[in-house]
Image (spheres, helix red, strand yellow):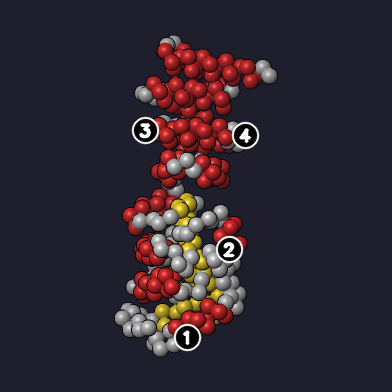
Amino acid sequence: MRLDELKRSVILRVFGSEEIYDYLEKLFNDEERISLEFNPTPEPSLSLPGVKIDNSEIYFHAVPKQNELQSFIHAIKIVAEGVKEGSEIRIITFVTPICPNCRATVDSINTLAQKFAIGHHIVDATMFPDFAEKYGVMSAPTTFIGRMKFVGAISLAKAEKYIRDAINGDYRDYLAEKLMGGEMDDVKTLIVEEGLGELLGELMGHEEFVVRLGAMATAEALKDEKEVVEGVKRTLRKLLKHEDARIREDAAMMLGMLGDEGDVKELENLISEGGRVADSAREAVEEIRRRDNG
């Protein structure tokens, strides 16, 4: 294997695995621009054996063979172009050696990881099954961009869009996509752990009916999460004034489920509107008072 075209020398920093070190030493024994370093402890951020490519934030937790080898070589070439310092967002991609879609996903994300200076860990799920199980990985590729989870191949354009969203802390489109796909468990986890109650409420005003329905079902499932509920209620009060009567009707219904006496006055203001919105507001007030009265 010849990598003479590399623009600069690259150090492969192996952590905690003599197997990986010995494999890479044989693979690159005639490469003048590739050198190896060995650290007997696991790579600290994931506490797994692996190899870090030079001073980049690209890591392979694998013995890079078959499809993984092609991605590994491609990553070395990307890193040789130059290393930046940047975002604290971390990406983890779970792969397997014979996965047909893993290489394209890994190569795309490595390119973006270098562009945005983001840490990218490529983890062989067959080599570290317990670690994959910890993340709930059932198939490859599975990619985590910050707190966002994607199962299956992910295009360069989609990966870049969600990397930018992760950097900006913008989860709206991601949550809408998950709700469209019926992946409520991922939505609930993110909403609770990131305190995104207000955003969940906003999704009840989404242009897609399936997203609105999923957001309402999620809020109902999280009704015992006080912080989330308070955030949802702040947004629902705004949605009571939405131009779309269907959204006003749904907002009133959800306030009946989640609200308290402090929400009654705003709900009563809708009763004068008449029609289905008024019926929903009236039922919401009755539900709140029935709940308050035990």
Whole-angstrom CA distance, mark 2 to mark 3, is 40 Å
Q: Is residue 263 found left or right of 243 in the rendered image?
A: right
Counting other residues with Cα less than 10 Å from the Cα at mark 3, is it few (<14), some (14-19), or many (20 or more)?
few
Q: Quadrant of residue 258?
A: top right
Residue 277: image location, x then y, percent: 44, 17
Query: Is 211 situated above or below 70?
Result: above
Counting other residues with Cα less than 10 Å from the Cα at mark 4, is it few (<14), some (14-19), or many (20 or more)?
few
* Mark 3: amino acid: Glu
Counting other residues with Cα less than 10 Å from the Cα at mark 2, is it few (<14), some (14-19), or many (20 or more)?
few
288 or 20, nearer to the observer = 20
Q: Earlier in the sequence, mark 2 or mark 1?
A: 1
Residue 99 seen anywhere in this rendered image of the structure: yes
Q: Earlier in the sequence, mark 3 or mark 1?
A: 1
Residue shown at the point (53%, 64%) measured from the top left: 125
Residue behind mark 2: 129
Residue shown at the point (63%, 20%) measured from the top left: 291
Whole-angstrom CA distance, mark 1 to mark 4, is 57 Å
Q: Quadrant of the N terminus?
A: bottom left
3 and 4 marks in contact (CB < 8 Å): no
Q: Earlier in the sequence, mark 1 or mark 4?
A: 1
Residue behind mark 1: 26
Query: Is 292 situated above or below 49?
Result: above
Residue 154: image location, x then y, percent: 39, 56
Residue behind mark 3: 207
Residue behind mark 4: 224
Residue shown at the point (53%, 72%) measured from the top left: 50
Query: Is 16 situated above or below 189?
Result: below
Whole-angstrom CA distance, mark 2 to mark 1, is 26 Å
